[in-house]
Image (cartoon, rainbow, N blue to C red):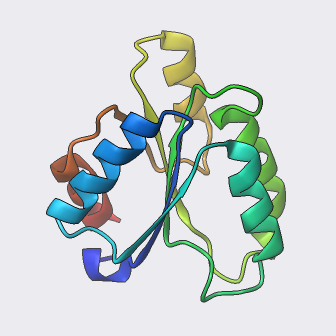
Amino acid sequence: MNLGSIAKIMLVDDNVIDRLVHRRLLEIHKIGENVTEYSSADEAINFLTTNRENKVELPDLILLDIMMPGMDGFDFMVHFSKLKDQFSKLPLVFMLSSTNDESDIRRVRANSDVVKMLNKPFSPESLANSLLKL
């Protein structure tokens, strides 16, 4: 995989400042051409459910915050795992967190649908290197 194949990015985070920072990092480092932001995991799952068969609308990459009110990142991944076989293309999922909680880190690593966990704010180099290794 190369960075050019990452055109659509879904950024899911309840914190408006974090979304702003991450969007700017993606723009500066020219990762993705189209970034769509969601302030809740519910909104993002609804979008994915509605567009699961629409290859044009589905993101190539999902950057998902772990800690959100209501449906958190782990709840999102439960829904994602149930939907993934219906997707016309399977988005890559990176979870984002500022936590050092070992139980959260273990949960992320145990989820085979998550490519990697990145610390917030994420390093564009770390994201790019992870994508290039795929």
Percent of width and height locating residue 38: 59, 52
Percent of width and height locating residue 134: 35, 65
Decide if residue 117 is in sight here. no
Residue 12 vertical placement versus 48 (above, below)? above
Percent of width and height locating residue 125: 16, 51
Say left or right for 127 vs 96: left
Residue found at x 73% / y 53%: 43
Residue found at x 38% / y 37%: 18
Q: Nearer the viewer, residue 102 or 5?
A: 5
Percent of width and height locating residue 79: 80, 49
Say left or right for 95 vs 17: right
Examine the image and state in which quarter residue 108 appears. top right
Residue 35 vertical placement versus 96 (above, below)? below
Residue found at x 33% / y 54%: 23
Say left or right for 73 vs 124: right
Residue 104 vertical placement versus 37 (above, below)? above
Decide if residue 97 is in sight here. yes
The image quadrant where one finds the N terminus is bottom left
Examine the image and state in which quarter residue 110 appears. top right
Residue 105 vertical placement versus 14 (above, below)? above
